[in-house]
Image: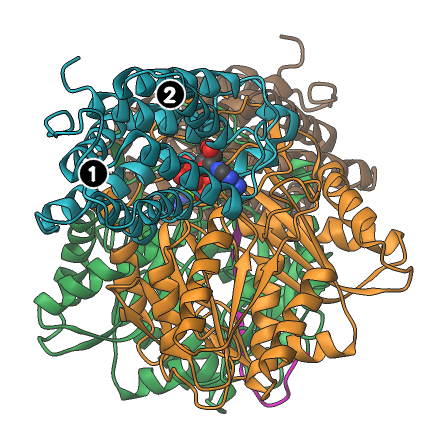
Chain colours: A green, B brown, C orange, D cyan
């Protein structure tokens, strides 16, 4: 795990300005969809606050794009707070986002379970409540690679975040109360599990060199989305075997009944070509089929990334009619769009 | 730095507290890459830039403060600045620490050793309350808790504040080194499980730097 | 330009099976949208052939995903033929695709200008015409990095391909004749220019190691989408300067009048994080603004890629009302979707 | 291989033609990585796998052919197979070359030297018609055209077919080497402009391998 001196080249001007410049690009690229508060580093739904609708706020460190800013729009998030690369935003940003999307029906904070994100969002929620805005928080912790325990930081929030933002967003759009929207997000978290594998590391703009180095035939198994090493290092293996390595712990955690229908989400960590993600999806489809589980809905692509890391994660969400309907509901964001 | 120029020989004034924070900022900026490297091994390679960004903002804030601002209010302002500029885990934790310390001092113009102990104990309590880390979890608490314990012990045994701060710094560094063999149970390093063993915790390392800055601030003659 | 011994790890089972396995994944992921002919390596619109509609066929080597298979669906392509990685498909595949999408109104072949693609599509068109299917072909050659000449292979087809598939697809969906659909594609090609820059090389599954190697402070300027070196090698520079390097030759080629509105397309070559693509888009927006050109429509993301190559291309299309309306028309494919 | 067992001493039969194609397949498979490496420098690193895939399919096709298939039909079947399995630039070009050569031979059972020349001239003409490459454009034409010219010259000056084929192979290899300093005007290498200079064309290289296989097929005794 030594820090290698290798250089990762990037399209940037100044490492300290990457996030604001990218946000200005988001504003220029999606004028009808979102507006950007550059001072607070927020991507806001163009028509926020929507009166009478529960506001959905998420956020986290940058470098996971399209998460979260790419999911702001009708039927999904009302606001996304962008921190520095891989660093949780600060409570001031979350507070500004909360105020900006408060349409009188309360605001839900969707928080990935990392100490930094949880603490900063908690502080923001306390401040917002002091200002008279009703806030609830749902913490997402779907990464089954990490053992859960009362005495640890617990599991990470990864792929299920995308699904929770979509599904809770649909619930809010359809007029759900703050409690109902929070319930929808919690339901996703309860019924989803994820597992990630990295083939390479990645480099933050500030450091410019990879966080860890891997041999030509090694992979990191059980990684999150911050370029960190995983639970263990293994020999590189076939797509079939790696898929099995990922599916086994997810299924062990979720224990879906045979005959279950799942949403299967094969997510690229940033540097893996789409052709490989579809190849992995084919493996997922076959291996789930062998276990009597069918894929009811699917998502394949780079949705929650770790800069240019080559790797992939699999998320399974055990569907029911409610979740399926909320998934299918129209969504209009930069990164996920259908029915609108 | 006016720490030792007061009538009460062992008491710190606002300038001394500000000097401590500036000294901490300088030390952290100097060790930025090292802190980031430690975080790269078991975290996400941002602890150096997080702390540097936050303490640089604290220095700007200190410049803006009224000359008459009492030590407690200096610490609260610094804590608030950290909360607003750092993000990550260390922002709320260090922000809370300094705010709690500041609140413990109230509006007093001078910080006597007993008050310094109370302030730092409040700081550690704030970190533990917020982050729920126990000693041995491989976090900044493993440097801070022994440091505060050593400070109290030294002051209670009659040491002058300079010597007590030196004892606190030594305890912090020892605590920092003691994180190496620990298995992380909090923060990002916990995701690594057994693989976190053998690496020094970045947050404990910056905590030791901050305690070393305290020693320098209370003993400008050294 | 020596072949380096570095290894690029991939999620694959067998290098020779990457394309069919990925296509099986596409079939499993998008059942309502497309069907896949595994024997001929075709992605077909689920309801093909659409009677009375001009059929749109494109295709090319694999490794450029989502191009072309990700653009099959309502309002875009009727069929995509997948060759081996970076190798044009064969006439048999194109012939099968042409037959499968022929709804009686003729079939348009959208061909990227590479010798292999052009020759194979030409043979397929001749065979199809022998079978009584009316076929027209539009060859796309928008890459301004390559000098055009009667005596050379000419310019490459790159980013404008995506725009032509969308716009010609909309024209076909709205009932255009074969001549009208071909005209729409040609109009896009005439009014579009592209330029690409690579920060790294990429590796085909068959070879497993990068096609070229670049120093830690070098970039390849004027690259295409096949992992090939570019027109020249330069020192790595700021996003601002690289954007200028790309925009200058495009604008020199297109010579848009001041006050023109363009579709600005910032495309990732596969391994560049989205945050950098938005940062580049911000540069494009600012630099075009400085030259009196406004961005009327935009597209930012990985749409025509070169496996895991880190790099980006910029494509500008000079808009008019017809092109804008066709761009805005509903599209429902795996990779581009709106209004449906 | 029955090339020299016929009554007409310099004529080739279908088995000899099939032997040529099998020999070409073996040589290409052996040089697969080298061809790909040449293509990596100025193309897209697939020429070795393209040609290997195509000629392997040709060998399968040859196994399926009727014993009585005349040489022309053997070449047409091989060309059709290349078109259907190679893709890229070389698939249509080599496919057309072999089909044109086969058509030039008609249904004749024996290929006399004059017919061999006519067939190969038709092959090159087909490549030029389809690909529009001129000599000097840095393509397979730069190996094929001199090879065919040398074959004709040798036969016309009375050389036996084995010697003529050797001359053709030598000319192909010389033409192949002559592509090194050329600036590419056709195919992917043309995108490189000046940077294509100094690299040997992969297509000219495989063409030379195919001409060398012809020499071996017509002179099994060597
Ligand atoms: N729950 C916690 N309690 C106390 N300290 C913690 C806790 N979680 C993390 N830390 C400290 O924070 C440090 C990491 O800080 P930093 O890298 O700035 O934030 P992040 O982990 O969000 O990237 C760790 O080294 C550890 O000392
Ligand atoms: N227009 C052309 N005429 C003749 N030969 C050509 C032409 N274009 C390319 N070639 C030959 O094809 C070779 C490349 O073949 P290959 O790599 O299999 O196809 P691709 O270029 O499609 O990847 C070149 O080295 C060159 O000799
Ligand atoms: Mg962090
Ligand atoms: Mg960190
Ligand atoms: Mg090719
Ligand atoms: Mg090639």
Numbered mark located on residue D168 in the image: 2
**Label ID, residue D110:** 1
Where in the figure is residue C174, as x and y percent of width and height? 59, 87
Q: Residue at x 77, y 43 (%)?
A: C249
Q: Residue at x 17, y 67 (%)?
A: A254
Please tell me whether residue A80 is drawn above or below residue B70 in the rendered image: below
Q: Is residue C80 above or below residue D122?
A: below
Residue A36 placement: quadrant: bottom right
Q: Does A243 sit above or below residue C93? A: above
Q: Residues within 10 Å of mark 1 (few under 14, many from 20)?
A: many
Count of marks overlaid on the render:
2
Q: Quadrant of the N terminus of chain B?
A: top right
Q: Position of residue B62 (x, y in %)?
A: 75, 37
Specify whether disc 2 shares its chain with disc 1.
Answer: yes
Residue D164 shows in this picture: yes
Earlier in the chain: of badge 2 and badge 1, it is 1
Q: Chain of mark 2?
A: D
> Could you tell whether B70 is left or right of D150 in the image?
right
Q: Which residue occupies the foreground of this view, A38 or A125?
A: A38
Does B35 appear in magenta?
no
Q: Which mark is residue B197?
A: none
Which quarter shows the C terminus of chain B? top right
Question: Which of the pair D46/C92 is nearer the observer?
Answer: C92
Using the numbered discs, state the Cα–Cα distance from disc 2 to disc 1 in whole angstroms: 20 Å
Boundaries of the magenta span: A47-62
Residue B118 can be seen, yes or no: no
The crowding category of the residue bearing disc 2, from other C-alpha atoms within 10 Å (few below 14, some 14 to 19, many at least 20), is many
């Amino acid at each position: 795990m030594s820090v290698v001196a290798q250089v990762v080249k990037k399209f940037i001007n100044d490492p300290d300005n990457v996030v604001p410049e990218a946000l200005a690009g988001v504003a220029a690229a999606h004028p009808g969809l979102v507006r950007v508060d550059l001072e607070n580093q927020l991507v806001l739904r163009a028509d926020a606050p929507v009166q009478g609708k529960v506001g959905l706020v998420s956020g986290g460190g940058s470098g996971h794009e399209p998460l979260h800013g790419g999911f702001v729009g009708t039927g999904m998030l009302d606001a996304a707070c962008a921190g520095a690369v891989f660093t949780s935003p600060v409570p001031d940003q979350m507070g500004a986002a909360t105020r900006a999307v408060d349409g009188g029906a309360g605001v839900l904070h969707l928080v990935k379970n990392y100490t930094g994100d949880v603490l900063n969002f908690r502080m923001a929620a306390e401040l917002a409540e002091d200002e008279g805005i009703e806030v609830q928080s749902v913490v997402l912790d779907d990464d089954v690679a990490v053992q859960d325990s009362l005495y640890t930081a617990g599991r990470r929030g990864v792929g299920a975040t995308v699904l929770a933002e979509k599904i809770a967003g649909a619930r809010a759009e359809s007029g759900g109360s703050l409690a109902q929207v929070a319930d929808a997000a919690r339901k996703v978290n309860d019924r989803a599990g994820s597992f990630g594998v990295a083939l390479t590391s990645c480099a933050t703009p500030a450091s410019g060199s990879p966080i860890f180095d891997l041999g030509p035939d090694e992979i990191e198994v059980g990684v999150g989305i911050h370029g960190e090493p995983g639970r263990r290092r293994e020999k590189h293996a076939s797509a079939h075997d790696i898929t099995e390595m990922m599916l086994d712990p997810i299924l062990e955690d979720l224990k879906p009944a045979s005959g279950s229908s799942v949403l299967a989400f094969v997510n690229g960590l940033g540097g893996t070509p789409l052709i490989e993600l579809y190849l992995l999806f084919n493996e997922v489809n076959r291996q789930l089929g062998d276990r009597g589980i069918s894929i009811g809905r699917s998502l394949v692509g780079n949705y929650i990334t770790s800069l240019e890391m080559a790797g992939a994660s699999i998320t399974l969400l055990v569907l029911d009619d409610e979740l399926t309907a909320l998934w299918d509901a129209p969504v209009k964001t930069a990164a996920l769009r259908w029915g609108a | 730095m006016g720490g030792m120029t007061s009538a009460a020989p062992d008491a710190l004034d606002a300038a001394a507290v500000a000097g401590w924070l500036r000294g901490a900022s300088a030390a952290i900026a100097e060790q930025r890459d090292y802190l980031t490297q430690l975080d790269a091994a078991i975290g996400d390679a941002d602890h150096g830039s997080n702390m540097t960004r936050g303490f640089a903002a604290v220095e700007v804030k200190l410049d803006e403060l009224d000359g008459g601002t009492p030590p407690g209010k200096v610490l609260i302002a610094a804590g608030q600045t950290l909360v607003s500029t750092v993000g990550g885990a260390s922002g709320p934790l260090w922000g809370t620490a300094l705010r709690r310390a500041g609140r413990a001092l109230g509006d007093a113009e001078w910080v006597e050793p007993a008050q310094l102990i109370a302030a730092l104990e409040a700081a550690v309590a704030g970190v533990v309350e917020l982050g729920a880390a126990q000693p041995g979890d491989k976090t900044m608490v493993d440097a801070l808790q022994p440091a505060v314990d050593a400070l109290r012990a030294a002051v209670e045994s009659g040491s002058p504040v300079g010597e007590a701060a030196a004892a606190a710094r030594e305890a912090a560094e020892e605590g920092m080194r003691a994180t190496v063999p620990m298995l992380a149970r909090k923060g990002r390093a916990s995701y690594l499980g057994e693989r976190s063993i053998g690496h020094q915790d970045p947050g404990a390392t910056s905590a030791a730097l901050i305690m070393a800055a305290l020693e320098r601030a209370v003993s400008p003659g050294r």
